[in-house]
Image (spheres, rainbow, N blue to C red):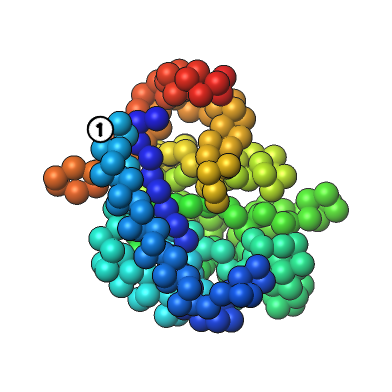
């Protein structure tokens, strides 16, 4: 492994935004945990500097109108190397925690799944415009619990919804973002990594640059499903990946050609 980008979810500042599994925590606890994360990441970066290039970042949220200001302050406070621009809420409600909560958002959109997708992509654009994150996280996370097995059409087949997704792709490309190909989607039972192949093809055709991510939530998930990820890269004809690198002039994007034949895959028994 050449470069390792560490990222922790940014702390949420309102008690009502805690997930059910965080019922014993407070926003202050989340802030303390984030501070501990940065301290430990800095320690590891120094300890292993001669073995691996570690970058320290954060994965964003977008919940209310105040979220953006909080994110800008957090980035400045900690001098983060990068942001993964993600959102996990629509209308202030979490969409990726459970199918039940996902369906509650649909209900708040008067049962209109296309409206739910529309709001997701509009909020995503706002996040991209305000923060210009170096990496766009799980671009189409909104698909996570869509009931495909019930034969309900994918809202992204709606030309108007698709235009919103393509608009966001074009904007992210315009300022130089990388799009992560995120293997955690397989843990959720989706066909492909995020983004699903229809949108990944659009990204590639438009000249978008891609990187890879396991979106691990613990050491047990590091390189999770990377064997499938390698096969997916090959299937999609991707031979060049991009990554971030920090030097005296700041964080820059570098390219890795021949990515699917790199020693990383065989060294970690992923072929």
Of residues 269 and 39, which is closer to you in this image? Answer: 39
Mark 1 Cα shell of 10 Å, populated few (<14), some (14-19), many (≥20): few
Question: Which residue is identified by label 1?
Answer: 50
Q: Is residue 13 visible?
A: yes
Count of numbered circles on the image:
1
* Quadrant of the frame with the N terminus: top left
Q: Position of residue 210 (x, y in %)?
A: 43, 39
Against 62, residue 41 (above or below) is above
Outermost residue to the left: 248
Q: Residue at x 65, y 68 (%)?
A: 21
Against 49, residue 81 (above or below) is below
* Quadrant of the frame with the C terminus: top right
Relative to 258, 95 lies left or right:
right
Q: Secondary structure at mark 1?
A: loop
Q: Residue at x 19, y 49 (%)?
A: 250
Q: Residue at x 18, y 42 (%)?
A: 247
Q: Residue at x 67, y 54 (%)?
A: 144
Of residues 232 and 111, which is closer to you in this image? Answer: 232
Q: Position of residue 124 (x, y in %)?
A: 49, 63
Q: Position of residue 61 (x, y in %)?
A: 48, 66
Relative to 10, 41 lies left or right:
left
């Amino acid at each position: 492994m050449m470069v390792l980008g560490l990222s922790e979810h940014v702390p949420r500042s309102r008690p009502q935004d805690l997930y059910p599994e965080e019922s014993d925590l407070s926003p202050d606890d989340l802030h303390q945990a984030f501070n501990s994360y940065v301290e430990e990441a800095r320690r590891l970066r120094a300890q292993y500097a001669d073995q691996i290039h570690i970058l320290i970042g954060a994965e964003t949220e977008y919940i209310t109108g105040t979220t953006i200001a909080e994110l800008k302050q957090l980035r400045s406070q900690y001098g983060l190397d990068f942001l993964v621009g993600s959102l996990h809420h629509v209308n202030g409600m979490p969409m990726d925690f459970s199918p039940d909560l996902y369906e509650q958002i649909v209900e708040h959109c008067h049962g209109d799944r296309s409206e739910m997708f529309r709001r997701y992509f509009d909020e995503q654009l706002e996040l991209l415009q305000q923060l210009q994150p170096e990496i766009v996280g799980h671009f189409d996370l909104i698909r996570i619990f869509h009931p495909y097995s019930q034969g309900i059409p994918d809202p992204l087949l709606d030309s108007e919804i698709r235009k919103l997704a393509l608009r966001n792709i074009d904007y992210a490309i315009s300022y130089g973002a990388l799009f992560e190909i995120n293997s955690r989607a397989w843990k959720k039972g989706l066909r492909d990594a995020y983004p699903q192949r229809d949108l990944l093809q659009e990204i590639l055709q438009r000249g978008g640059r891609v990187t890879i991510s396991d979106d691990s939530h613990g050491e047990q998930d590091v390189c999770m499903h990377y064997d499938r990820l390698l096969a997916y890269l090959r299937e999609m004809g991707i031979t060049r990946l991009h990554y971030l690198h920090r030097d005296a002039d700041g964080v820059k994007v570098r390219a890795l050609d021949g990515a699917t034949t790199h020693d990383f895959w065989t060294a970690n028994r992923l072929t």
